[in-house]
Image (cartoon, rainbow, N blue to C red):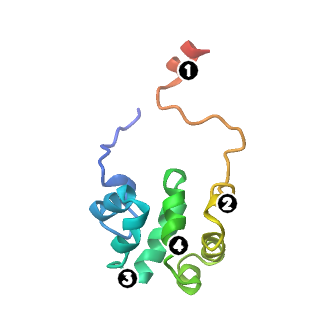
Amino acid sequence: MNRAYPVSAEDPAGDCPVPISTLSQLYRAEPEALAEQLGGIPEATRARLAIYLYGRNHTRHLGVQIAVTCEGSSLRRVAGFVGNALYDLSRQNPALWSEASPSNGGKRGVSLAGASAAARRA
């Protein structure tokens, strides 16, 4: 028997180093306002946030934008080699950021509709 667990807005942010309200504000911020909003967040927290966001496909670009505001040592302290790579990426031309994102290798995405919906489409 499958057990269903309730899902809330808090679940995806379980490991997020900032409150969900702060994350939401940063996500919606215009690029010019982002630096101002990040100013009140300590660098160690910004580094953890950059790594957290970079690790998720839909927030990867925001993670790189936040990494721009961090020192390399802070990112390395949080994530080692990944932090170092993120630091290097954040210092490149922003047009190259999407090229450095790993692709899914042509694999199909996960469907939450279930097998019966997939069979109907086929």
Q: Residue at x 54, y 58 (%)?
A: 60
* Crowd tier of the residue under label 3, counting other residues whose Cα lies within 10 Å: few below 14, some 14–19, many 20 or above: few
* Crowd tier of the residue under label 4, counting other residues whose Cα lies within 10 Å: few below 14, some 14–19, many 20 or above: many
Q: Nearer the viewer, mark 1 or mark 2?
A: 2
| Residues at marks 3 and 1, CA–CA distance in whole angstroms | 46 Å
- Circle 3 sits in a helix, a strand or a loop, which is it? loop
**Quick one: quadrant of the N terminus?**
top left
Q: Circle 3 sits on which residue? A: 42
Q: Nearer the viewer, mark 4 or mark 1?
A: 4
Residue 75 place in picture, x, y as percent: 55, 79
Return the disc, 3 or 1, that comes first in the chain's sequence. 3
Kind of residue at disc 1: Ala
Q: Circle 1 sits on which residue? A: 118
> Is 76 left or right of 42, judged from the image as shown?
right
Kind of residue at disc 4: Ala
**Mark linked to residue 52:** none
Return the disc, 4 or 1, that comes first in the chain's sequence. 4
Q: Circle 4 sits on which residue? A: 67
Return the disc, 4 or 3, that comes first in the chain's sequence. 3
Q: Circle 2 sits on which residue? A: 96
Residue 5 place in picture, x, y as percent: 33, 43
